[in-house]
Amino acid sequence: MRQGNVIGTSTELVASERIFIQGNTFVAPHAKLDATEGPVSIGRGVSVLRGAAVACAAGTGAAGASVGDGSVVGAGASVSAKSVGSHVRVGAGASVGASAVVHDHAVVGPGARVAAGSLVAPFAVVGRDGHIGTHPGVETISAV
């Protein structure tokens, strides 16, 4: 069993003094962790794959952004969420917007989009190329 963290030699750590990584975590080469706007906390046993980016979005607050234990951020995925829970799977090329919350055991499929401020319930699945939250160009209809 692996002990400690494995951080790729070409991993980009921005504002590294505000990045906190628990044990047994893997951050692949060419991945990016960005704490410019606030702290980023990566839980135990997390995998951040090649080309993925995890960042604290502006306005997230002092708590910053977090990825919970045992979660996987897929290749080329972008996560600016306030919180990604434990044992969450974010698929390749997916994006999770600023201040979104993805609860434990949820799945955000490959290419899926979770809009800023959205909530993904525990054990929920956002399917491949699915969208949750606001959609550009979709008009809101109010009750009369």
Image (cartoon, rainbow, N blue to C red):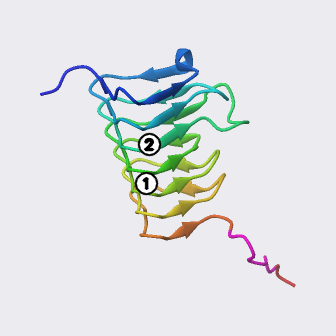
Distance from the alpha carbon under mark 2 to that under mark 1: 9 Å
The quarter in which the C terminus is drawn is bottom right
The amino acid at mark 2 is Gly
Indicate whether 133 appears above or below 89. Answer: below
Mark 2 / mark 1, whichever is N-terminal: 2
> Which element carries disc 2, helix, strand or loop?
loop
Q: Mark 2–mark 1 contact, CB under 8 Å?
A: yes
First to last magenta residue range: 135-141
In this view, the residue farthest toward the bottom is 144
**Residue ranking furthest to the top:** 17
Left/right placement of residue 117 relative to residue 121 reads right
Choose between 93 and 60: the one closer to the eye: 93
Residue visible at 36% across and 23% down? 22
Q: Is residue 73 left or right of residue 70?
A: right
Quarter of the rendering occupied by the N terminus: top left
Disc number for residue 122: 1
Percent coordinates x, y for residue 117 in the rendering: 66, 52
Residue at 65 percent of width and 38 percent of height: 57
Q: Residue 23 versus residue 87: which sits nearer the camera?
A: 23
- Which residue, as the protein is rendered here, is positioned at the far left? 1
Residue at 41%, 36% (x, y): give it. 68
Which of the 4 quarters of the picture holds residue 113?
bottom right
Mark 1 packing: few (<14 Cα in 10 Å), some, or many (20+)? some
* Label 2 vs label 1, nearer the camera: 2
Helix, strand or loop under label 1: loop
Q: Quadrant of residue 25?
A: top left
Camera-side residue: 111 or 102? 111
Name the amino acid, label 1. Pro
